[in-house]
Image (spheres, rainbow, N blue to C red):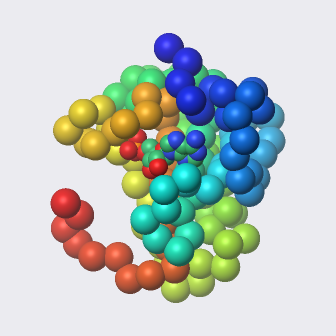
Amino acid sequence: MPTIFTKIINKEIPADIVYEDEKCLAFKDINPQAPVHILVIPKTEIRSLADITPEHQELMGYLLCKVTEIAKAQNLKEGYRVIINTESHGGQTVYHLHIHIMGGRQMNWPPG
Ligand code: AMP
């Protein structure tokens, strides 16, 4: 099912886009939990990490490589956290696969 992220991909609603190509989009989280909080999403509609199959192997590798590039472009030299909230116990609220990049402050462990 399309989500609000499909509307962002289709430019039907605005987002603060920091990177875009034919396979993915990265934009600032509307409710940032860190000084830098970016979401990286595939343009293909995939519900969650739980729906990934071997056919997605190349795309998933591609997205992770983009995470590294985007983190570098954001100057997150001291590190950052990468999160994929998955389904309800994982705290997922938007059911379009997305990778959070959070940085610019010290992260703690364990997360809540
Ligand atoms: P999750 O809880 O992992 O599903 O994360 C969904 C994230 O999407 C949350 O951090 C929201 O703040 C963010 N979000 C929801 N709607 C928008 C939007 N229109 N633009 C940017 N970020 C959004």
User: For this rendering, which residue is in front, 30 or 94?
Assistant: 30
**x%, y% of residue 94?**
43, 34
**x%, y% of residue 48?**
41, 30
User: For this rendering, which residue is in front, 95 or 21?
Assistant: 95
Name which residue lies at 26% across and 42% down.
Answer: 90
Name which residue lies at 35% across and 44% down.
Answer: 85
User: For this rendering, which residue is in front, 17 or 84?
Assistant: 17
Q: 30 above or below 111?
A: above
The extreme top residue here reads 1
Q: 68 above or below 1?
A: below
Tell me which corner region of the image, top left, top right, bottom left or bottom right, holds residue 23: top right
**x%, y% of residue 109?**
23, 72
Residue 47, visible in the rendered structure: yes
Residue 56, visible in the rendered structure: no
Q: Count all numbered tags in the image, as a single digit.
A: 0
User: For this rendering, which residue is in front, 9 or 72?
Assistant: 9
Horizontal side of 67 relative to 92 (left or right) equals: right
**x%, y% of residue 54?**
47, 25
Q: 4 above or below 37?
A: above
Tell me which corner region of the image, top left, top right, bottom left or bottom right, holds residue 67: bottom right
